[in-house]
Image (tube, rainbow, N blue to C red):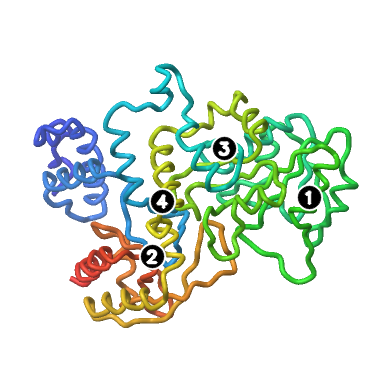
Amino acid sequence: MQLRDLPSVDELARRSDDPLAVEAARRVLARAREEIKAGGRPGDLAERLREELDSARAPHLRRVVNATGVIVHTNLGRAPLAEAALDRIRDIARGYSNLEYDIAAGGRGSRQDHVTKMLQRLTGAEAGIVVNNNAAAVMLALAALAEGRDVLVSRGELIEIGDGFRIPEVLDRSGARLREVGTTNRTRAADYEVAVGPETAVLLRVHQSNFRIVGFTEQPRLEELAQVARSHELVLVDDLGSGALVDVGDEPTARSSLAAGADLVCFSGDKLLGGPQAGIVVGRADLVEKLRRHPLQRALRADKLTLAALEATLTLAIDAPEQIPVVRMLRESPETVRARATRLAELVGGEVEETVARAGGGALPLTELPSFACAVEEELAAKLRTGDRPVIALVRDGRTLLDCRTLTDAEVDETAAAVRAART
């Protein structure tokens, strides 16, 4: 075929009644010209147009199967939602809701009311507020309580929380001024005491959720910081990062932080809690009210679908935490995981290999969860990743490992079908 033999864009586009046909035809013909110039043959242009249109119509955000063994995988959407949360989203999304309507009073209500009582029950807090992520929660707290004033933070807690976002930058955007205390590896309550001045508004403790400093180290207990804050009539804010409402490893809970004397506690909804992306602040009612009334709150507030999923997740955290997928995966016994790996290996002719899973999401960085994987050929990894239902796995020691701690029982069959398809 010569360049002069190629149809025009309009001529090729007329072979389809798809409104995207003209744009797709331009792309098909551009590639065809390059192939002809390189000495190749572009093949059936009508078929290539159909493939281009199929690709353009395919959803870009897709469900994938997580076979990495990283439970709260940031790149893979973090926490999978419980069925109860999905049901609540469907129920609220299909029509209208009382998002900001008080049904009993017949007038305007607050969207925060839908989760406040459960947050109080789970954490022992006087009040709570929900925004769209934990970075927003910290920024709102500092903007409402310390704008134009000093916030004391240990040098060992000036962490990067992921994707390049750093605590000093979040603090700067809030309008507060950072004042570092102590050293990277050793900070004492006395360092805060000495640093307090007339412009100090907040003591901020940032939990080292995504790393640990070991060796010659020291950090004050939260009770000690609370005593410093009270003696100077300052606010103590505890940023837990990943956060947890039920006991998970050695991760501190919001309830324990408040009991230790924190005035406000900030944490994520989509990590160890196992819910939707959200930032949650709980603590003293007067301080939460200041956050609620701050102008930034409207820009950061959570939408109705987030609140629906969060309400359902919090209900499960009270009544049946094992139904929250993240909690189940963190607590599941190695024997159960081994059985899942054995079944997958039998379905695909693989081998069961002992491995280690991780909590992920910047939580429990030193915790290794005993796990088991189904090992298959290394060359299958790319094919599994690019299949109709992408399966994301690990490649190690010349084999593809399908870690079964992050697979559900139903996904074992789905993964087996993907492996068989990748081998054809």
Q: CA distance from mark 4 to mark 1?
A: 33 Å
Upstream in sequence: badge 2 or badge 1: 1
* Residue 72 x, y percent position in the rendering: 46, 58
The answer to which quarter of the image holds residue 349 is bottom left
Which numbered circle lies on residue 406? 2
Q: 388 or 153: nearer the eye?
A: 153
Whether pointer 4 and pointer 2 mark residues with C-beta atoms closer than 8 Å, the reply is no
Of marks 4 and 3, which one's residue comes earlier in the chain? 3
Secondary structure of residue under mark 1: helix
In the rendered image, the vertical position of residue 166 relative to residue 12, given as above or below: below
Q: In the rendered image, which residue does mark 1 sit on? A: 225
As measured in the structure, the alpha-carbon distance from the residue carrying label 4 to the one carrying label 3 is 18 Å
Estimate the spatial distance between the alpha carbons at disc 4 and disc 2, rounded to whole Å. Answer: 20 Å
Q: CA distance from mark 3 to mark 2?
A: 31 Å
Numbered circle sitting on residue 316: 4
Marks 3 and 2: CB-CB under 8 Å? no
User: Camera-side residue: 22 or 300?
Assistant: 300
